[in-house]
Image (cartoon, grey):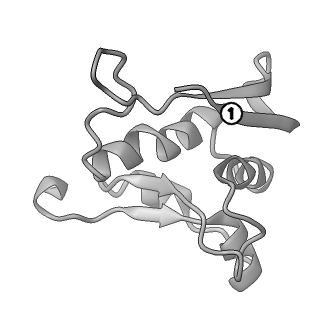
Amino acid sequence: TNSDKKVGFVFCPTSNAQITEKMPDFDMLMNSGFPVMLGTDSVASGQSLDLLGEMKYLQIHSNVTFEEMLSWVTINAANYMQWDDMGKLKEGTKPGINLITGFDFENKVLKSTSKIRRIL
């Protein structure tokens, strides 16, 4: 099982676009049984270290839903890194809560003007 091995997939969309000009087989990754996470590579092979920017890029260049992308940058990454306090709202924890503004709730997509701000 994956719990015995520290294996997961981290995908950096803008780096992939710049280096290989391809996107991976997302269905294969999501059905692999291993966690999928979204990351940034470096400014040498990507446009920035902005995860929201990576999500916006991926949204345009794939059929991955916002909900799936959100799990890739939140719960999947926190679980993989064993950051047990992430997302828990209780005294003594550091939940790491961010606010995304400019979200299109009707279509469940980020807008080009969407921004993120850490609130906790």
Residue at 63% over, 75% down = 42
Q: Is residue 110 above or below residue 51?
A: above
Q: Is residue 54 left or right of residue 87?
A: right
Q: Quadrant of residue 85?
A: top left
Give the quadrant of the N terminus: bottom left
In the rendered image, is residue 90 in sight? yes
Q: Nearer the viewer, residue 120 or 113?
A: 120
- Which residue corresponds to the image point at 45% horizontal and 60% vertical from the top-left? 28
Give the image location of residue 11, x and y in percent: 54, 64
Residues 60 and 47: in front is 47
Name the residue at the right extreme.
Answer: 113
Does 44 appear above or below 12? below
How many numbered marks does the figure carry?
A: 1
Which residue sits at x=25%, y=36%?
84
For disc 1, the marked residue is 117
27 or 41: which is nearer to us?
Answer: 41
x and y percent of residue 89 in the render? 37, 17
SS under mark 1: strand
Q: Position of residue 73 (x, y in %)?
A: 51, 45
Q: Is residue 80 above or below residue 8?
A: above
User: Which residue is painted at 16% across and 64% down in the image?
Assistant: 5
Q: In the shown orientation, is residue 102 left or right of residue 71?
A: right
Type of the residue with mark 1:
Arg
Query: Can residue 111 be seen?
Result: no
Q: Residues within 10 Å of mark 1 (few under 14, many from 20)?
A: few
Residue 49 at x, y percent in the picture: 67, 62
* Residue farthest left in this picture: 4
